[in-house]
Image (tube, rainbow, N blue to C red):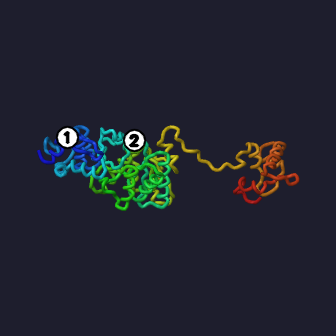
Amino acid sequence: MSGGDERVSGRHEQVNGGGERVSGGDERLHRVFLARVIEPGDEVSGRWLRQLGAGEVVRRLFGQGEQLPGVTDKRWAGLRARAQQADPERDLAVARDAGMRFVCPGDPEWSAQLDDLGDARPIGLWVRGRPNLRIWALRSVAVVGARACTEYGAHMAAILGAELAERGWVVVSGGAYGVDGAAHRGALGAGGATVAVLACGVDQPYPRGHTQLITRIAEQGLVIGELPPGDHPTPSRFILRNRVIAALTRGTVVVEAAYRSGALVTARAAQRLGRYTIGVPGPATSGLSAGVHELLRGDAVLVTDAAEIVELVGDMGDLAPDRRGPVLPRDLLDPDARRVLAALPARRIASAEEIARGAGTTQDDAVGKLYELRSLGYVERHGYGWKLTREAMIPVHPDRRRC
């Protein structure tokens, strides 16, 4: 048995980042070990874990048993080389010092929503922050979008983040520049809850320019990731990180995204998982909104504010208010009076007979309604004819030209 295998399978106790006592030979320590060896989202390795368990996978990686199926000899050799360098006890010690904890399937804090990923679910998650991940995930929404967003995109993301937080929803995003950062700041500014899902070790804030923001998120919310302490991001890790954002939340809102945006990867992952996919429209001429508009041409739902988002992802009865224009005084007229009012020409005097024909009623009924309309200030009498007042002309006939 190698030294690395002894570190994993020895029965002495270690302390994880949350201060919990764990046995060195149990499922948790095996998963801490495997998080250092296996890349996020590896479905082949996920199948090993499901069929054999973490302990057996670790045993095989140290040469105690035959090679696991589904990988080439070259890749198996690479995994075994990684295994020789992994030190779960060191990772847990670093996590403890950084105020992090490791949460894995079977833990009370593990979110069952992540299990929807099947064999691609995380081996475990490194978590920085005090709140309970499982509880927060139950009422969470992802807000994602372009890094190089427009002012409109940043404004909409910040407003949505703040409004969702004010309604008691957790805002989840990737901590990146642009839409992600604006959504996080909106939630934080409203005194609400937000979660940043990183594509690197959560003790290594990325991007560096968001170090202060990510630190603030860790103090007020949660910073989570699959990569062990100290690990750096890569393009593939960013893409794979997005599936965690989609699975962890009840819906994904895309604010701005070009055709090749990583935010669309998150949205499509949400669709595959049966989550709500939601888009905020932008100008038809904006390339940064082209990807969102393509989503909206499919199964995504168009929204313009947080109330509409909550109506989709929330509980029964969380309805957005009806959208309508202002109620004008003439809207309160009875239908017969509205027809008579509409029958008056815009710029000239008309007889009661002409008005009655236009309204489709008798002359006596038309005269009765005209006197009613005069008392309300809509019409005035000129000899034997009737004319709209100045106040009534524009709202009733905005597009008519002088007759």
| Vertical comparison of 351 with 135: above or below | below
Q: Nearer the viewer, residue 122 or 303?
A: 122
Where disc 2 sits, the SS reads helix
Determine the residue positioned at 74% across, 45% down: 333
Disc 2 crowd rating (10 Å Cα; few below 14, some 14-19, many 20+) is few
Residue 9 in which image quadrant: top left
Question: Which residue bears the numbered disc 2?
Answer: 135
User: What kind of residue is marked 1?
Assistant: Gly
Where disc 1 sits, the SS reads loop
Q: Nearer the viewer, residue 34 or 361?
A: 34
| Vertical comparison of 312 with 255: above or below | above
Q: Earlier in the sequence, mark 1 or mark 2?
A: 1
Q: Nearer the viewer, residue 384 or 111?
A: 111
Question: How far from the left and from the top, in percent, is residue 319?
Answer: 54, 42
Determine the residue positioned at 30% across, 40% down: 105
Disc 1 crowd rating (10 Å Cα; few below 14, some 14-19, many 20+) is some
Determine the residue positioned at 18% across, 49% down: 83
User: What kind of residue is marked 2?
Assistant: Ile
Would residue 351 be visible to someone looking at this image?
yes
Question: Which residue bears the numbered disc 1?
Answer: 25
Question: How far from the left and from the top, in percent, is residue 280?
Answer: 49, 52
Question: How far from the left and from the top, in percent, is residue 2?
Answer: 12, 47
Q: Quadrant of the C terminus?
A: bottom right
In the visual, does 250 lie left or right of 45? right
In the visual, does 9 lie left or right of 180? left
Which residue is outermost to the right? Answer: 383
Would residue 257 be visible to someone looking at this image?
no
In the visual, does 53 lie left or right of 240? left
